[in-house]
């Protein structure tokens, strides 16, 4: 079976990376003074954002949202607390650190090692040489992703049968995470932390499994992508998770799937 793998996932994130870059000189690209200047501007932008949030009303926040009023009020309070203008520099620093980790995740080490100051690059500035390297890599990513998408489109209908709605609509917990995986003979249970996933499934029971791939590091990892196929009475599940900068995957064949809920 053909899958969207973690290689596809990472390269899909790099296809437009060059579009967020603006040019600076080679001297600026490695300058501490230049970093401090543009970071101050970035912090001011964050402070402005926080001030906008501080001045927003609950009615604006809750508009067009379907969660319960109690939950929305809790989220609104937390949203305000997490965007205090007084904490703008702290928030800016945290966001920059997250962006740096993200770039280290999606860019090859060969490019990362060529960047004079990753902080400046993460703030969207690069000299001509680095811009060219990133643009070339982004084009490579785009070609790879287009090839994968084309092959997937050509092959999908030929390799899967209709999946029952009660299975299809419940499988997939993007935004949630895997608490634990328990194996009992040929059966397997995924215990799910569904917070952030939009799902109320707490466990997924797989019967009579054949494990094709089950990477280490799945327990505790965020669930970021999944696929499901059904052929000749067998479900085929594929998922990609994220644990820091690792992307453990699983591919499992199973004859039956059942769910537990917190309804």
Image (cartoon, helix red, strand yellow):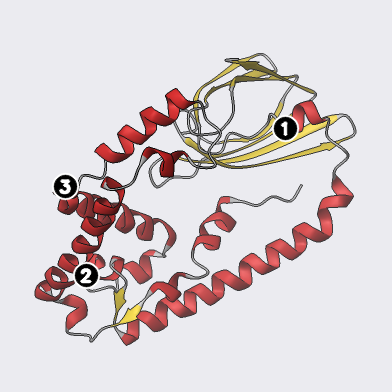
Query: Of helix, strand and loop, which one carries label 1?
Result: loop
Question: How far apart in space, not on screen, are marks 2 and 1 (Cα)?
Answer: 45 Å
Say which mark, if any, is on residue 263: none
Residue at 61 percent across and 16 percent down: it is: 261
Is 97 situated above or below 134?
A: above
How many numbered marks have been drawn onto this rendered protein structure?
Answer: 3
Mark 1 Cα within 10 Å, few/some/many (few <14, many 20+)? few
Residue 209: x, y in percent?
72, 24
Dividing the picture into quadrants, the one containing residue 83 is: top left
The answer to whether the residues at label 2 and label 1 have Cβ atoms under 8 Å apart is: no
Left of 255 or right of it: where is 182?
Answer: left
Disc nearest the viewer among 2 and 1: 1
Q: Residue at x 59, y 71 (%)?
A: 142
Q: Earlier in the sequence, mark 2 or mark 3?
A: 3
| Residue designated by label 1 | 169
Measured from the top left, where is residue 234 in percent x and y? Answer: 83, 30
Q: Which-is-in-front pick, marks 1 and 3?
A: 3
> What whole-number distance in Å separates the C-alpha atoms at marks 1 and 3?
41 Å
- Residue bearing the label numbered 3: 87
Instruction: State the SS at label 3.
Output: helix
**Is 73 situated above or below 100?**
above
Nearer-N-terminus badge (1/3): 3
| Crowding near the residue tagged with mark 3, few <14, some 14–19, many ≥20 C-alpha atoms within 10 Å | some
Foreground label between 2 and 3: 3
Dot 2 crowding, Cα within 10 Å, few <14, some 14–19, many 20+ = some
Q: Quadrant of residue 110?
A: bottom left
Farthest residue in the top direction? 184
Q: Residue at x 33, y 87 (%)?
A: 128
Q: Position of residue 255 (x, y in %)?
A: 80, 24
Q: Which mark is residue 117?
A: 2
Q: Earlier in the sequence, mark 2 or mark 1?
A: 2
């Amino acid at each position: 079976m053909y899958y969207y793998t973690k290689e596809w996932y990472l390269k899909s994130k790099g296809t437009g990376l060059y579009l967020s870059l603006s040019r600076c000189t080679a001297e600026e690209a490695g300058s501490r003074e230049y970093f401090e200047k543009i970071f101050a501007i970035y912090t001011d932008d964050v402070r402005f954002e926080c001030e906008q949030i501080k001045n927003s009303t609950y009615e604006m926040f809750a508009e067009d949202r379907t969660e319960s009023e109690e939950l929305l009020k809790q989220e609104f309070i937390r949203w305000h607390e997490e965007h205090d203008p007084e904490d703008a520099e702290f928030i800016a620093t945290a966001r920059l650190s997250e962006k740096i980790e993200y770039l280290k995740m999606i860019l090859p080490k060969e490019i990362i090692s060529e960047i004079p100051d990753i902080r400046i690059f993460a703030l969207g500035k690069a000299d001509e040489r680095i811009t060219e390297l990133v643009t070339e890599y982004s084009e490579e990513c785009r070609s790879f992703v287009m090839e994968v998408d084309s092959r997937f489109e050509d092959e999908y209908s030929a390799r899967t049968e209709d999946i029952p709605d009660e299975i299809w609509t419940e499988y997939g917990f993007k935004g949630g995470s895997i608490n634990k995986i328990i194996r009992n003979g040929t059966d397997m249970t995924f215990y799910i932390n569904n917070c952030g996933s939009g799902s109320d499934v707490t466990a997924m029971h797989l019967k009579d499994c054949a494990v094709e791939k089950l990477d280490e590091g799945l327990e505790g990892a965020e669930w970021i992508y999944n696929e499901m196929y059904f052929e000749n009475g067998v479900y085929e599940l594929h998922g990609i998770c994220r644990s820091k900068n690792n992307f453990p995957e699983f591919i499992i064949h199973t004859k039956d799937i059942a769910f537990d809920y917190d309804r």
